[in-house]
Image (cartoon, helix red, strand yellow):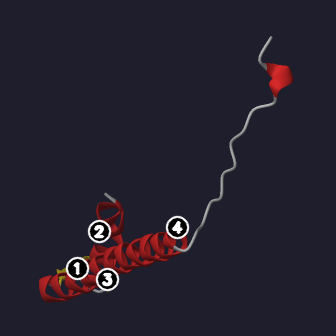
Amino acid sequence: MRIIAVLPLLLVAACDVQKDTKNDQVTMKLDTGSIENKADTLGNAAEKAASDVGNAAQNAGESLENQVHDLHVKVDVGHDKSDQHK
């Protein structure tokens, strides 16, 4: 969804507007190759960011798992005879 928000910026970057004051004309050229290249770069950056987030989550999970395996819990359950009559 955020990529859609960046598309207008890609269009502006790929535009070449020239004003001919003698003939009272404005010429606008759109470089589609530039748009495609920038969109590819943006897509690659998004893919890398998603991969980095996935790797961080996996590393955090493995770290938690290692800590849980090393956790030893000692439970001593007993009862007090004075609590039997309550």
Residues at marks 2 and 4, CA–CA distance in whole angstroms = 46 Å
Instruction: Check if mark 3's residue and mark 2's residue have beta carbons within 8 Å.
Output: no
Q: List the residue tagged with mark 3.
A: 48
Mark 3 or mark 1, earlier in chain: 1
Q: In the rendering, at what x and y percent does residue 3 appear?
A: 31, 66
Check disc 1 and give the amino acid type.
Ala
Pointer 2: residues within 10 angstroms few (<14), some, or many (20+)? some
Check disc 4 and give the amino acid type.
Val
In this image, 44 relative to 53: left or right?
Answer: left
Check disc 3 and give the amino acid type.
Lys
Residue shown at 13% from the left, 88% from the top: 33
Q: List the residue tagged with mark 2.
A: 7
Name the outermost residue toward the top: 86
Mark 2 or mark 4, earlier in chain: 2
Q: List the residue tagged with mark 1.
A: 39
Residues at marks 4 and 1, CA–CA distance in whole angstroms = 43 Å
